[in-house]
Image: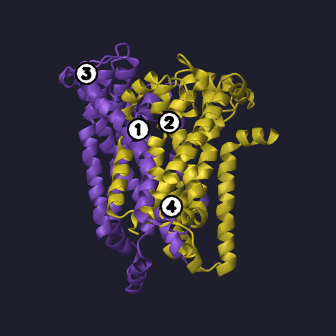
Chain colours: A purple, B yellow
Amino acid sequence: MASASDVLNPRRYFMDDRRFVGVMFLAPALLYILLLVGLPFLLAIAFGFSDVTVGNTELNFIGFDNFVAVWENDIFRQVFGNTVMFTLVSQVFILIFANILAIIFTQEFTGKWFARFIFILPWATPVSLAAIGWLWMFDTKYSPIDYLLLQTGFLGPKGILSNSRNLYWLANPVLSQISVIFVQVWRMTPLATVILMAGLSSIPTDILDQAEVDGSRFMRTLLQIKLPLILPIMVIALLFSMITMFGDMTVVYVLTRGGPVDYTRIIGLYSFQIGIEGGNLAQGAAMALFAFPLLLALALLMLRTASRAEVR
Amino acid sequence: MALLIWILQNFWSLLVLSFATLVGLRIAYRFRKYGATRAELSHILRRSPFYLVVLIFCFFAAAPFMIMFLHSFKVDGDLYRRPQPFIYRQDPTLEHLESLFTNTAYLDFIRNSVVVGVAVVIITLILALPAAYALARLTGRWGERAGILMFLVYLVPPTLLFIPMFRIVVMLGLKDSPLALIVVYPSFTVPFSMWLLQGFFKAVPPELEEAALVDGYNRVEAFLRVVLPLSLPGIISTIVFTFTLTLHEFIYALVFITNTSRRTLSVGVPTELILGDVYFWQPLLAAALIIAIPVGFAYNLFLDSLVQGFTMGAVKG
């Protein structure tokens, strides 16, 4: 029991105060993060309005020139379009596959542990290393996929898809885009699945029991109870993987470096190539900033969905 | 070694055979348990489409890894000159694996990744453990707002920040130093860990802390001696996922470190094991696979705990 002397002891008093300890506990992390993200973020905006390069450290304010230049750049428009297109198209597939897989993996079946191990590999492997595997799968000359197609008669002299022995996955405009989207779907589906699994497992069992008592079959339980209940979490999974994909350049960096021409170039990669490789920090920052309003809108939408899901 | 050669040479038949054996054993087991009745047979038939779907997904997930494994041991002549990607025409070799460890900076990459990862995990725990506890128990509304702010910060992608970060790193003289990565990585590992840990802390019954307070512990002691030990499994899974986040990170590692022997795995392997246009495919594929398998195991081992953390974090406590 706390005695009178304890109450009078100032150290003891502070250590027991919820608010005081709360602030002390939260402050270091909050300050570190705000400093580490806030400062560069402000600097990114400052860069966007200046003419800074790798060689020239002075920040001269030049107004909206960078943004105008970036927007009038035809390549950037295509890059922006690519980014949006890749993100949206892959989300459709990710959502379909993640739903199927989440339902599969919330059931009991023989060999579940092994199946789960295999299916999580694409997400567990560092992206750049997994992309190397696909770079080889899509190789211009030795692609194992092409070999399979050749053997099954889709390729080769009388091939249905092409007369040559190879499809040149990463050199063909359309195929390279398909390849990039495929790899993104391949590696992001497990993450979305895990989020959906968390949602499915948080459905109160009494609801499901009641449904079973009432004679609801598997499909009906799925469509009328499970899916509506995890809809908010599905939206969260969707927005989360959209934001992750929007801000990622690893897959295209390893697979294509943006080629052929600009067909697979996306904002992150282009801003790296202009800003760091080309040394024009200001324009690189301006490009990255173009994506920010979109990202912010996505993030806010996600938070709204999340808080609504909690209220219910 | 002989076993490895045998496995590689009979890879596909072994795969099909072992799978068929497992299926057979399973069916035999069910027949013995429930009797080989017509009902049992129709049960198996009804379940088979389900397993087929699982099998197809597994195949797509595993395809590049199987090829990585199969091709890491091919001699150049077998890999390039007469392309027959799925079988071995010449004997497998370990020479590429050896050259990966002796002729390239692969071991340096591993060491750098471990150094960066461990340091980041320590910083992350120091910052995130108390902060997550504060969010879970101590602070009310404003803590919730701070939590949302952290979450928004987590969503600011590296592609937006790497250019100014690069400038700052150069100004501080940290370019090519692992310290640059160690300082910057907590910007995403801390929010992630806070989110996860908060869920685990909420799962600890508040009565236990109150009992500790009544017994004369103060808040800080109650946190250190009661809450932390009870959330140990959650903390371990947070460590695992924080470490792998640093292993995955690509953009900062690409921009901040340009010196070969200082690079980390995620950037070193795809950039340094390629000389100009010459790809050393066998070592490249082996390098990727060697990392993929252990990380895959770790993920699978801690996945349930991750899902639990997500779920608890989402439930209002």
Q: Residue furthest right?
A: B2
Lower position in the chain sequence, tag 3 or tag 4: 4
Q: Position of residue A125 (x, y in %)?
A: 55, 43
Q: Is residue A226 placed above or below B19 in the rendered structure?
A: below
Residue position marked by numbered label 3 in the rendering: A50
**Mark 3 and mark 4: Cα distance apart in space:** 51 Å
Q: Around disc 1, counting alpha carbons within 10 Å, would you say few (fewer than 14), some (14 to 19), or many (20 or more)? A: many
**The image quarter in which residue B212 lies:** bottom right
Residue position marked by numbered label 4 in the rendering: A11
Q: Amino acid at mark 1?
A: Leu
**Mark 4 and mark 2: Cα distance apart in space:** 33 Å
**Mark 3 and mark 2: Cα distance apart in space:** 27 Å
Q: Which mark is residue B183?
A: 2
Identify the secondary structure beneath mark 2: helix
| Label 1–label 2 contact, CB within 8 A | yes
Q: Is residue A308 placed above or below B14 in the rendered structure?
A: below
**Mark 1 and mark 2: Cα distance apart in space:** 9 Å
Q: Which mark is residue A73?
A: none
Q: Do the residues marked 3 and 2 share a common chain?
A: no
- Please indicate whether residue A202 sits to the left or right of residue B16 in the image: left
Letter of the chain that mark 4 sits on in the rendering? A
Q: Amino acid at mark 2?
A: Val
Seen at 41% across and 56% down, the residue is A23
Residue position marked by numbered label 1 in the rendering: A36
Q: Position of residue A2 (x, y in %)?
A: 53, 75
Q: Do the residues marked 4 and 2 share a common chain?
A: no
Letter of the chain that mark 2 sits on in the rendering? B
